Image (cartoon, coloured by chain):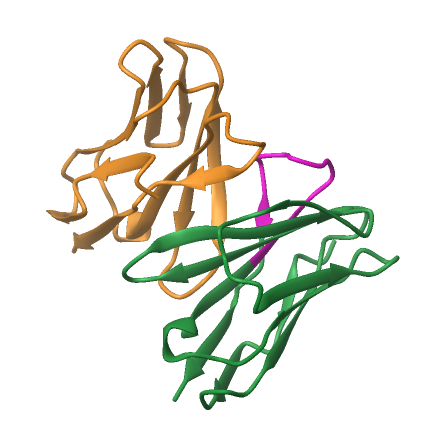
Amino acid sequence: SQELEQSPQSLIVQEGKNLTINCTSSKTLYGLYWYKQKYGEGLIFLMMLQKGGEEKSHEKITAKLDEKKQQSSLHITASQPSHAGIYLCGADIGRGNQFYFGTGTSLTVIP
Amino acid sequence: KAGVTQTPRYLIKTRGQQVTLSCSPISGHRSVSWYQQTPGQGLQFLFEYFSETQRNKGNFPGRFSGRQFSNSRSEMNVSTLELGDSALYLCASSSQAGANVLTFGAGSRLTVL
């Protein structure tokens, strides 16, 4: 969805390295959701950010929401092969209760 | 409890045919949403059903339709298939209408030849 742009589009990192994925909205964000998808499978909900400045962590994944910049970042510390997959941000950006997903970031972690 | 179940997982059709995909949500979930995922367009919203009523519809032609049954199971149908309909079709369920925390099925991969 062009309403939510993610960068980078793809990422290849060595195991143990840190990385950051960004999600930028063209419209006001009222909440931001991160999902992960293993190739060719369904999405798994990771975390939800609802307030500006909110930061949440789950294991080695941390997500932050900057409402002023209409942006969220997902940071993975000490990446592992199990982190590989496609990361998608999602948001309801106020257009008739329709949930939009970002363009996706494909992450490969090399052992 | 069982997750979201989609059938069939894989199918191949030819242009002009129609296809019906099925989705059984998590027990107790009354909302079912459908998404189309392609390499070029990414993940796009098709429609959402809640309590047998279509709540919302994405920007897809009328060839794409869906319905929900009283047991919350949902089907989507694509008629007059085109090559561009080849995609992974994902179903997601939630307990509330318009919820954004969704539980997804593994998807149905449709190939149109």
Quarter that holds the N terminus of chain A? top left
Q: Quadrant of residue A100?
A: top left
User: Height in image: A1 above or below A32?
Assistant: below
In the image, is A44 to the left or to the right of A55? right
Quarter that holds the C terminus of chain A? bottom left
In the image, is B66 to the left or to the right of B86? right
Q: Residue drawn 68% across and 62% down? A: B66
Find out whether residue B95 is within the magenta segment: yes
- Name the residue nearer the viewer: A13 or A100: A100
- Name the residue nearer the viewer: B8 or B49: B49
- The spot of residue B56 in percent (x, y) is 63, 43
Q: Residue drawn 46% across and 11% down? A: A51
Q: Residue drawn 47% across and 18% down? A: A30
- Name the residue nearer the viewer: B2 or B32: B32
Find out whether residue B30 is within the magenta segment: no
Q: Which chain is orange?
A: A
In the image, is A46 to the left or to the right of A63? right
Q: Which residues are magenta?
A: B91-103
In the image, is B71 to the left or to the right of B3? right
- The spot of residue A12 in percent (x, y) is 13, 50
Q: Residue drawn 54% across and 37% down? A: A98
Which secondary structure type mostly characterizes the magenta part of the structure? loop
Q: Which chain is green?
A: B
